[in-house]
Image (cartoon, rainbow, N blue to C red):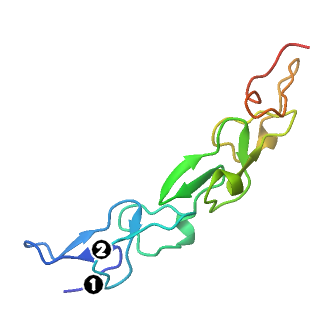
Amino acid sequence: LTRASGWKLTTSGDVPIEPCPERTYSNYGDGACTACPDGFLCPEMTSEKALWANSCPLGSYCQGGEQTLCGIGTYGIMERAVDAGNGCAPCPAGYYCEEGTENYELYPCPRGHYCSSDPGGSIDTGAPM
């Protein structure tokens, strides 16, 4: 029997190994899957808990392997964020940030409108000037 990372060993039935489900990982020889660490995504059959390719992307934060986008009126400030407090920041005045915005500079407020720095209203292009 060859042991494969990302799979857990089992003694039931004819199938000696089964894949670790999404939001978990395992190393070689593990008998169980472990919860994905915060700041990372763990797709099915993830083999390392802190694999850089599975870093939580900019514009979101990840807890327990589950991705949540930065909210409306905020933008992402770092990869591998574990919560909104360290991964998302208020969109600056003059720009609007939709859910999951990675770079606010790509979304300037349209001509003839204003965009406040109020997170609740920054995607609203405001009133005509």
Which quadrant of the figure has residue 104?
top right
Please tell me which residue is depicted at 86% across the width and 19% down the height of the picture: 113
Please tell me which residue is depicted at 87% across the width and 35% down the height of the picture: 93
On-image quarter of the C terminus: top right
Task: Work out how far the residue at label 1 is from the one at label 2, CA to CA, in angstroms.
Answer: 8 Å
Residue 3: mark in rendering = 1
The x, y position of residue 71, in whole percent, is: 65, 40
Which quadrant of the figure has residue 57?
bottom right
Bin the neighbour count of mark 1 within 10 Å (Cα to Cα): few under 14, some 14-19, many 20 and up: some
On-image quarter of the N terminus: bottom left
User: On the picture, is 129 further left or further right than 51?
Assistant: right
The x, y position of residue 94, in whole percent, is: 87, 32
User: On the picture, is 32 further left or further right than 61?
Assistant: left
Callouts 1 and 2 close, C-beta under 8 Å? yes
Please tell me which residue is depicted at 32% across the width and 82% down the height of the picture: 30
Please tell me which residue is depicted at 53% across the width and 73% down the height of the picture: 50
Residue bearing the label numbered 2? 7
